[in-house]
Amino acid sequence: MAVNASRMDEEQIGISKKETLIRLFHYLLDYKKEVVLVLFIMAGTITVSLITPLLMEVAVNRYVAEKDTAGLFTLGGWAIILFLLFLAGTKARMHIMASVSNRVLVTIRQQLYEHIQTLSFDFFDSRPTGKILARIIGDVNSLKDVLSDSVTQLIPDLTTIVCVAVIMLIKNYRLAMAALLTVPLLAIGMFLIETNAHKKWQIYRKKTSNLNAYVHEDLSGIRVIQSFGAENETRKAFYELANQHRKAFIDAVIIADGFGPVVEITWGLGGFLLYFIGIRIIGAGEIGIGTFMAFSTYIAMFWSPIRNLANFYNKLTTNISAAERIFDILDTKASIQDLEGAAPLSGLKGKVEFSHVSFAYSDEPDQLILKDVSFTVNPGETIALVGPTGAGKTTIVNLISRFYQAGKGQVLLDGQDVTKVTLESLRSQLGIMTQDNFLFSGTIRDNIRYGRLDATEEEIIEAAKAVNAHEFIMKLDHGYDTEISERGARLSIGQRQLLAFARTMVAKPGILILDEATSSIDTHTEILVQKGIEALLKDRTSFIIAHRLSTIRKADRIFVIDQGQILEEGNHQTLMEKKGAYYHLYQNQFL
């Protein structure tokens, strides 16, 4: 299976920027009332800002020219009132949009998290956890300003530019054309910068993901690193990834920072052309001082939002790559999902059938892990799977739980094809224990109850007693309320394993799968838990994968697996008398 390591850049399916923006802004439709209110407020603030230069023109050409002090003061009073309304409206719209954008981020993050939980094991097998975290946390956070500014900045600035251009053309089209001559230069410059900057920001996001994945991996394996004294090697690797991250950021910023100078240069040229053409070609006397002052204000009002738009465009270019990465995950389909018409699996009795099953990973279709495997297990039977590492033992139980799907053949439970029943109903009736038993941060009670969330206190304690975990739990400072970390640092390996047994016991599964579940238990603890395992196996179909052959001697049947096929099957006594593959495995282990 192809794996994306922490130091490898991720491959990403290309999504058009237009499509990405439409999908992103579509989230704002859930907040129509708030957006309409913001647009209404903005209409008022834009009107106020557009009136201001006209008030200046009237003040100079009329009241100052005619020395009408009373009229000037009255006009100034209205100007102050309008200015206060402008400030209040601006603050209100920013507050509303900040609230909306944060709620949208919660929605996107929730959708992303829920979708990731539906994805199949091959998705998680092929990439580090840190790279998934980078998309859920960092990439989603990057969208906040884009969502907020798209309403509070993009719409008013575009409206202001159009309105100012129209007003200038109406008042004096020659001056307006002079001021707008440099707009085409601006458009060309921004297009060239954006095209290159977007590629650089995509690289930066990938380097961020690599760094995040490496740190997560490094901290998760800190015990191994310190045990082998590998701090210098990991420090060098981190330094290399941090430098790649820094360089990618600098490369992107150098190009993105070109937006500002392009705007300033074209603004300056536009202002120069306004005065040059207005004074030298048209003539200042023909225009009027008040009109010139109004035009000067309007030209600033025209270019200032263009500068804001350039900054927004820069921000959009910076963060659209984050949106692309988010939608890349959301568009990833689970390779294992409920088929149309899938029915719930109820009342599982435990009959398991493999009918000519073959399996290979999708990226290596010619390398079969299982080859035409067939067997039938009756309800209540205990089946042991033994054989060398990589023989296909775990693949068999993964196909039963449909963590992966058979390429050929059928896997049947109680005569029903596992591909035609719902995943939730299937997996809720299976109890699965592995050698790598993950504990969640929280109390011991919470970890046991995770097997069945509606389990009562009595059922939790009963399950713990059944696997001989109750005694050591009660010796802890707070008993079942003892807080543990996800690594279970305060517990021994054997104790963590016993908690996992209790968690499985409380689930009361129809089919039990133990994948090397006793490999981490010492001999003394194993003796304690054997009675618990026998109680767990009683009257339910069970599959036990074990390298420690002493743990499976009482199994009803033992399947010897090698190179994806069942070489032998039978109980311990039969296989020992046969003196075949199982006999040699047993002799090698105990001699």
Image (cartoon, rainbow, N blue to C red):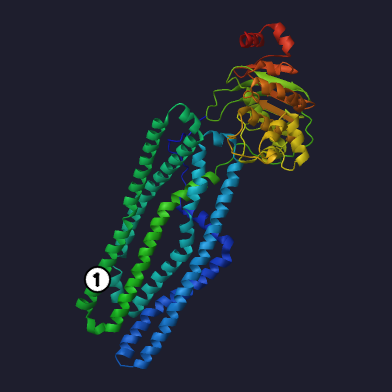
Give the image location of residue 201, x and y in percent: 39, 48
Image quadrant assignment for residue 57: bottom left
Which residue is painted at 56% across and 28% down in the image? Answer: 361
Instruction: Work out whether 189 lies above or below 126.
Output: below
Q: Callout 1: 10 Å neighbours few (<14), some, many (20+)?
A: some
Image quadrant assignment for residue 489: top right
Instruction: Work out whether 193 lies above or below 130.
Output: below
Quarter of the image where the C terminus is located: top right
Instruction: Work out whether 561 lies above or below 44.
Output: above
Which residue is painted at 48% across and 61% down in the image? Answer: 148
- Is residue 435 toward the left or the right of residue 555 in the image? left
Between residues 158 and 238, which one lies in front from this camera angle?
238
Instruction: Work out whether 68 lies above or below 376.
Output: below
Q: Is residue 125 visible to us here?
A: yes
Between residues 167 and 75, which one lies in front from this camera angle?
75
Q: Amino acid at mark 1?
A: Leu
Which residue is painted at 60% across and 34% down in the image? Answer: 490
Which residue is painted at 21% across and 73% down in the image? Answer: 276
- Is residue 35 toward the left or the right of residue 342 in the image? left
- Is residue 563 toward the left or the right of residue 534 in the image? left
Give the image location of residue 245, x and y in percent: 38, 43
Q: Is residue 445 visible to us here?
A: no
Give the image location of residue 556, x and y in percent: 75, 18
Residue pointed to by mark 1 = 273
Secondary structure category for the residue under label 1: helix
Give the image location of residue 450, x and y in percent: 68, 39
